[in-house]
Image (cartoon, coloured by chain):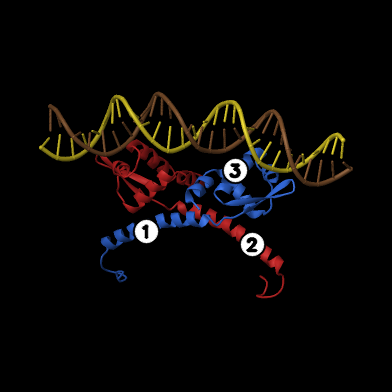
Chain colours: A red, B blue, C brown, D yellow
Amino acid sequence: MSTDAVFAALADPTRRTVLDTVAAREGITATQLAAGLPVTRQAVAKHLGVLAEAQLVAGERAGRETRWRATPAPLTDAIAWMANVGAAWDDRLAALRDSATPARGSRPPR
Amino acid sequence: MSTDAVFAALADPTRRTVLDTVAAREGITATQLAAGLPVTRQAVAKHLGVLAEAQLVAGERAGRETRWRATPAPLTDAIAWMANVGAAWDDRLAALRDSATPARGSRPPR
DNA sequence: ACAACATGCAACCAAACGGTTGCGGAAAGG
DNA sequence: CCTTTCCGCAACCGTTTGGTTGCATGTTGT
């Protein structure tokens, strides 16, 4: 829900790798994830916890192991925020361009 | 250049506000930014430093003050990374859907 | 029943982080 | 010339963070 948690979750590179891997290999376990990473299983478990709190992944216990899957829907908000900053920047740029060349060329907006 | 720095820079909410404001008001100074935030000018200066290192903003000294402007081009890489995760997830979803309903409805891809 | 395996929880630790205060120096304005 | 203003640098501080080790619990297979 909160973009705050999403951005915070994506801040760590290891955590991004975890999310990436979970997205690629649905149903993967923490132990399997840790096998391909230079950190311990517990570290991975913590990362998964953070990602889960940001609702970017979800885990389901199946017997003695926990299967994880990606739920990247909250990324939409983060992308929207970034696009907005870019848009604001483009507006500035457009305004600058428009004021620099008020006439000439294509017709002014509106 | 590195998406690492970009994601790290966007992790802090205050820093995101700073970037947002700089994008909206080109040529703003650190002191002006701090006036609209609940932190000191030095804190803002640090945030601008982090954002500058991620190449999301750039400052230019003009007399005794430093004007800041947004350079949000690196956001593209970050957005691309997110889109990729979402795409991988969609692929999984598509594969799941395809395997679940191999026939019927619209023709299968390829 | 028992050994092997996967997980979760808790404590602990060093480093990074966000923030502050204090100070020194350069530009503007009187 | 002197004061004001804006800046950058450095030191310091409490909290968060990424990581570890150790242990207790539940599950699977023989």
The three-letter code of the residue at mark 2 reads: Leu
Packing grade of label 2 (10 A; few <14, some 14-19, many >=20) is: few
Q: CA distance from mark 3 to mark 1?
A: 35 Å
| In the rendered image, the vertical position of residue A72 relative to residue A52, given as above or below | below
Label at residue B47 = 3
Q: Chain of mark 3?
A: B
- Give the label, 3 or 1, closer to the camera: 3
Q: CA distance from mark 2 to mark 3?
A: 23 Å
Q: Mark 2 falls on what kind of element?
A: helix
Given residues B109 and A41, the one toward you in this image is A41
| In the rendered image, the vertical position of residue A109 relative to residue A50, given as above or below | below
The three-letter code of the residue at mark 3 reads: His
* Residue B92, image quadrant: bottom left
Q: Tags 2 and 3 in contact by the CB under 8 Å rule? A: no
Q: In x, y percent, where is residue B17? A: 60, 47
Q: Tags 2 and 1 in contact by the CB under 8 Å rule? A: no
Q: Mark 1 falls on what kind of element?
A: helix
The three-letter code of the residue at mark 1 reads: Asp
Q: Residue at x 43, y 45 (%)?
A: A13
* Residue A101, image quadrant: bottom right
Q: CA distance from mark 2 to mark 1?
A: 35 Å
Packing grade of label 3 (10 A; few <14, some 14-19, many >=20) is: many
Q: Which residue is mark 1?
A: B90
Q: Mark 3 falls on what kind of element?
A: helix
Label at residue B48 = none
Q: Is residue A16 visible?
A: yes
